[in-house]
Image: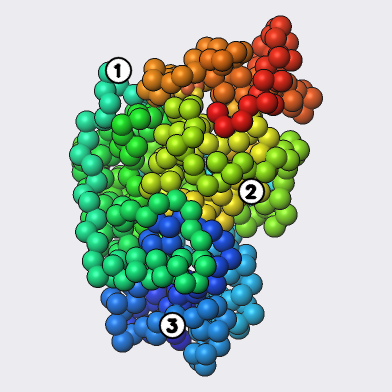
Amino acid sequence: MRRWLFADQLGPHFLDGPRQPVLLVESKAVFRRRRFHRQKAHLVLSALRHRAAELGDRAVFVRAETYGEAVRGLGEPVSVCHPTSRRARDLAHRLAAEVLPPRGFVTAPADFTAWAGGRRGLRLEDFYRDARRRHDVLMDGAEPAGGTWNLDHDNRQPPPRGADKLAVPPPPAIREDDVDAQVREDLDRWARDDGIEFVGRDGPRLFPATRREALARLRHFVRHRLPVFGPYEDAMLAGDPFMAHSMLSAPINLGLLDPLEAVHAAEDAYRSGAAPLASVEGFVRQLIGWRDFVWHLYWYFEPEYRGENRLGARSSLPDWFANLDADHVDARCLADVLAGVRDRGWVHHIPRLMVLGNYALQRGWRPDELSDWFHRCFVDGYEWVMTANVIGMSQFADAGRMSTKPYAAGGAYINRMSDYCGGCRYDPKVRLGDHACPYTAGYWAFLSRNAAAFEGNHRMRQPLRGLDRLGDVDAVVEQEAARGTP
Ligand code: SF4
């Protein structure tokens, strides 16, 4: 039967064999509905069109307004691997496609459900260990390689003192081709003639759109960047947005690489002595731990989870943030990270969590709007990725179903983990007055606003005691309520 491939199912592992006929659909309606980052739109279209060109006669490639139009117009039955959003899954059912189990993830849904059933709290660490055992990754018999499951404590180093870049070679540049040129021309035309709006700036394509490019990036990462990845995975440098991160999330989420092949490549590097265990363990944890965990939670939690807002955060995202207007932001960390989103559609997980998400959490911005913003503005963003990451982890809007405490932090954290504060007009130690760091002041204002909600949380006892000792908290709250663009 012909296999309908969505644009995030582009690798060979979504097909049953090398000769299976394929349906690929490019839907314009997707871009009319929401304002995606220009570079994300480019990447997705480029990947889809490259795949169509690779498949040649084996693929029917339809450009249509909607998926429904394309599938109905085909007039033959199709099968599809379980789509990655509820909307797409329901559409596949409505179009009478045969829906197969998901591919592109490591743990099977039934195994996750069996693991999760009856547990009071769903914690990544437990899931991750179970996945390591189940898939025999970094295991020496029944024991974890190196005798320990978790090397997080080795992987939280601040950036090297005095360095403005990590000493690792950058990923090889992507060479754009005729397909990219056509995509760019089409997107310009859609914006000009069809009123389709994008957010962010156009720029050279930075992420793989073909399997060949994705494999090249994986090989380069494992050989040159993985050894340094672990210790500095949480660090930020203004002059080095990529640090030693793999930049593989986009091609993996497009389905160009199977996460397990990346995991095996990293494990091989450890076994051959080419990369230290801490780096390899950190990378493996991201893939078979965190990535799979948030995928399963998207389906395991009820659909209403996306609207959770237990801290009652009611403010809409301000325009400067929604439109990535970094030029009018003084806070150096936030300006740099927002400019990174504007110019690349990508920053690594710590700027996402501790600069962008932390700021939104402190201000009481609506979690559903923030989740949608991350989905649209990041090249690797999808609804399944962002729901648990933003609603649960970053915004603590689910009252602790997936995190034991909110990821709120003051300027001291950013100062320790980056080189931002030195060149900033604010001072991370100051919470009141002209030089008050918006993160430090925002942290106390956030705690003050939510003190009652955190009362029974033993991990928040110490911060709440700190809040009690603060003599000027009312003034800080007032100051932050009046703060415009930071
Ligand atoms: Fe960011 Fe505050 Fe540091 Fe400025 S002082 S860079 S606003 S954490």
Q: Is residue 206 above or below residue 240?
A: below
What is the crowding at mark 2: few (fewer than 14 residues within 10 Å), some, or many (at least 20)? some
Residue 296 position within the rendered picture, expressed as x and y whole percent measured from the top left: 57, 54
Residue 318 visible in the snapshot: yes
Type of the residue with mark 2:
Glu
In the image, what residue occupies the spot 59% across and 52% down?
Answer: 372
In the image, what residue occupies the spot 34% across and 77% down?
Answer: 52
Left or right of 117 in this view: 128: left
Marks 3 and 1, how far apart at CA: 53 Å
Type of the residue with mark 3:
Val
Earlier in the chain: of badge 2 and badge 3, it is 3
Residue 64 position within the rendered picture, expressed as x and y whole percent measured from the top left: 49, 81
Q: Considering the numbered disc 1 on the image, is that residue within a helix, a strand or a loop?
A: loop
Residue placed under numbered mark 2 in the picture: 369
Type of the residue with mark 1:
Arg
Residue 414 visible in the snapshot: no
Q: Which mark is residue 161?
A: 1
What is the crowding at mark 3: few (fewer than 14 residues within 10 Å), some, or many (at least 20)? some
Residue toward you, 189 or 244: 189
Q: Considering the numbered disc 2 on the image, is that residue within a helix, a strand or a loop?
A: helix
